[in-house]
Image (tube, rainbow, N blue to C red):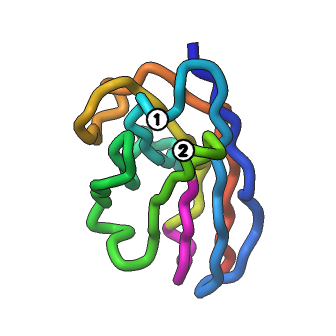
Amino acid sequence: QVQLVESGGGLVQAGGSLRLSCAASGRPFSNSAMGWFHQAPGKEREFIAVITRRGGSTYYADSVKGRFTISRDNAKNTLYLQMNSLNPEDTAVYYCAARSGSGYYTDPLEYDYWGQGTQVTVSS
């Protein structure tokens, strides 16, 4: 079992920044590929970014490339998402997710564990 707890969401003006964190406990964090997803009201959960278990590779959705950065600190069992140049279209609940494996994964169905989510609201 893996427990994930997100934090760092909030209300920010367009053009602003937020840093999300995801604290993990349970199975060794360094064995898990980690992803960020978001879900806006009435929409399906969408892939944002993924990082491999050692942090050597990252991959982003086109909509956030160049604005968001995913990182991890395996010593602290924590995943991060630095979000810059936010716009109202980024408004959603943001979730972190974990799964075992050495690759990177973009489909929500590929993940076994999810956090409860943190709300990000970007005002225009």
What residue is at 52 percent from the left and 65 percent from the top?
90
Say which label, 2 or 1, has the lower sequence index. Answer: 1
Q: Assign the N terminus to one quadrant of the image.
A: top right
Residue situated furthest front in the rendering? 75
Q: Is residue 97 above or below residue 75?
A: above
What residue is at 45 percent from the left and 70 percent from the top?
68
Q: Are marks 2 and 1 in contact (CB under 8 Å)?
A: yes
What residue is at 56 percent from the left and 42 percent from the top?
95
Range shown magenta: 80-89
**Which residue was labeled with disc 2?**
74
* Quarter occupied by residue 82: bottom right
Residue situated furthest bottom in the rendering? 15
Q: Is residue 98 above or below residue 26?
A: below
3D distance between C-alphas at marks 2 and 1: 6 Å
Secondary structure beneath label 2: loop
**Which residue was labeled with disc 1?**
30
Mark 2 crowdedness (10 Å alpha carbons): few <14, some 14-19, many ≥20: some
In screen coordinates, is 105 left or right of 41? Answer: left
Residue 83 sits inside the magenta stretch: yes
Between 111 and 10, the residue placed more toward the observer is 111
Question: Percent from the top left, x then y, of residue 92?
Answer: 58, 54
Residue situated furthest left in the rendering? 103
Question: Percent from the top left, x then y, of residue 61?
Answer: 30, 59
